[in-house]
């Protein structure tokens, strides 16, 4: 049997080739994946679509993100090879429902509208659809064997390894020892976090402390020069990073690196892929910052940190999920309940509560504590509601369009209210999707 190398087709991209020992795959939540295969030419391709069409002016959008512009590009590859549309076989997957929507909010069903756009294009092009599995609430994994053109669709959580079927109930008394046993967050990160909104931090002292820790220093520079934070001038030292980036950007990097170690937990827990918990946190942080800039409703630096830490409670509960993840995921899939309700039912606590307690034990600013505790229910927060709504929206976008961690439908029942609180409305929701940086969607798995 020929060994197949895996190739991740990121959101907003496509991959096409002939008879190579490669298995292309995409994780699909709200997004829609489409494969095309030409049996006679032994040529196959896959595209990973975010939206039905672009909200931006022609020439400014990234065409592979949208059904109306991306599918013609994919088809054109086959046409250039002399392949007629009638000889192609297609497969469609994804388009999960964003959440429980009512008649007024049906236009929010981005996945469903993307599926409609895909079907309309394929029908008009006379391309036969051999397999289609769309809608529902779960993340799917679409795979395409480039050697034989075979496409398969399955729930993403089936990719995880078997674990026990039992669930353990925990209380605050039991959770305190768990929190105490967690890998301690470096003091330099806590110092930065407690300085948010203040001018009391000594920049030279912070930079000096980072330099003393060779591992932290190396990781900070690596992230600084990554595609997510890339600057035209390569950064080669901590001092240079502080000078070029300034206090806010430098602080974001250091805290992000420190938090990564916190999120290095079980590979059988919340994450649907290795490193998924940290990647999701980083995605929500970057999107939160973009939303804060776009709306002017919160301090971008604070929004970034709040987004980075919003799911820290999952670190506390991850061992519980890891020890019982088949029943955890199956309950979510069968009942279509939000994960936090299933957490409460199985473990007696949900991750927002656990995160709030952990943030309190770290003596983080109240703004961060509230964002962590209420990011799934901003309407319950008395203060800092604009920041919490921004983090809530960033979490929704990150989970819907890059389902590295997505296991359940997002709760969008109060979405209209949350949008209004950050100065947007339902008609502008698609514009918020366009704020997601392409580097996030292409982040390696």
Image (cartoon, rainbow, N blue to C red):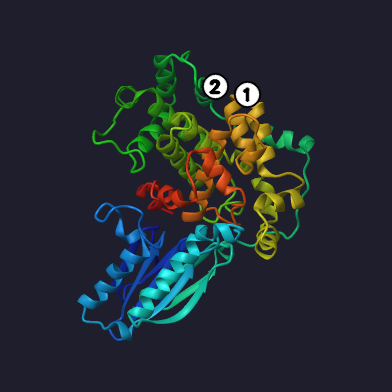
Res. 98 visible in picture = no
- The front one of 159 and 87 is 87
- The front one of 197 and 242 is 197
- The answer to whether residue 375 is left or right of residue 46 is right
- Residue 66 drawn above or below residue 282: below
Res. 223 visible in picture = yes
Q: Which residue is mark 1?
A: 363
- The front one of 370 and 297 is 297
**Crowding at mark 2 (Cα within 10 Å: few <14, some 14-19, many 20+):** some
Cβ atoms under marks 1 and 2 closer than 8 Å: yes
- Residue 22 drawn above or below residue 360: below
- The answer to whether residue 346 is left or right of residue 112 is right
Residue 116, quarter of the rendered image: bottom left
Residue 103 image position (x, y, % from top left): 59, 61
- The answer to whether residue 115 is left or right of residue 13 is right
Residue 292, label in figure:
none
Q: Which residue is mark 2?
A: 194
- The answer to whether residue 266 is left or right of residue 347 is left
The number of numbered discs placed on residues in the rendered structure image is: 2
């Amino acid at each position: 049997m020929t060994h197949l190398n895996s190739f991740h087709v990121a959101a907003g991209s496509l991959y096409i080739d002939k008879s190579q020992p490669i298995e292309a795959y995409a994780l699909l939540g709200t997004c829609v994946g489409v494969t095309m295969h030409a049996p006679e030419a032994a040529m196959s391709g896959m595209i990973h679509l975010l939206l039905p069409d672009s909200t931006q002016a022609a020439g400014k959008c990234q065409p592979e993100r949208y059904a109306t512009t991306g599918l013609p590009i994919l088809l054109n590859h086959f046409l250039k090879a002399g392949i007629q549309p009638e000889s192609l076989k297609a497969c469609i997957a994804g388009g999960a429902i964003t959440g429980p929507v009512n008649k007024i909010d049906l236009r929010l069903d981005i996945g469903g509208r993307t599926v409609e756009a895909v079907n309309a294009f394929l029908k008009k092009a006379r391309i036969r659809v051999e397999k289609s599995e769309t809608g529902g609430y779960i993340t799917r994994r679409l795979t395409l064997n480039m050697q034989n053109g075979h496409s398969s669709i399955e729930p993403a959580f089936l990719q995880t390894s078997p674990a026990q079927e039992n669930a353990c109930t925990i209380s605050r008394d039991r959770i305190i020892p768990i929190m105490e046993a967690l890998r301690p967050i470096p003091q330099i990160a806590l110092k930065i976090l407690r300085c948010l909104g203040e001018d009391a931090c000594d920049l030279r002292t912070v930079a000096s402390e980072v330099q003393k820790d060779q591992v932290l220093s190396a990781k900070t520079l690596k992230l600084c020069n990554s595609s997510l934070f890339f600057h035209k001038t390569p950064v080669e030292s901590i001092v240079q990073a502080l000078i070029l980036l300034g206090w806010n950007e430098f602080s974001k990097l250091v805290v992000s690196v420190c938090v990564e170690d916190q999120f290095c937990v079980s590979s059988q827990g919340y994450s649907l892929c290795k490193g998924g918990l940290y990647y999701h946190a980083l995605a929500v942080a970057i999107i939160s910052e973009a939303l804060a800039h776009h709306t002017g409703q919160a301090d971008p630096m604070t929004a970034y940190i709040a987004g980075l830490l919003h799911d820290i409670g999952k670190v506390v509960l991850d061992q519980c999920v890891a020890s019982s993840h088949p029943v955890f995921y199956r309950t979510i899939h069968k009942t279509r309940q939000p994960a936090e309700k299933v957490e409460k039912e199985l473990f007696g606590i949900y991750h927002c509560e656990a995160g709030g307690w952990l943030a309190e034990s770290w003596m983080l600013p109240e703004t961060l504590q509230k964002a962590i505790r209420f990011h799934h229910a901003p309407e319950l927060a008395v203060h800092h509601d604009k920041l919490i709504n921004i983090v809530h929206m960033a979490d929704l976008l990150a989970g819907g369009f890059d389902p590295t961690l997505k296991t359940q439908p997002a709760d969008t029942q109060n979405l209209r209210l949350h949008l209004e609180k950050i100065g947007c409305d339902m008609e502008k929701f698609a514009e918020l999707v366009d704020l997601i940086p392409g580097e996030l969607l292409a982040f390696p798995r």
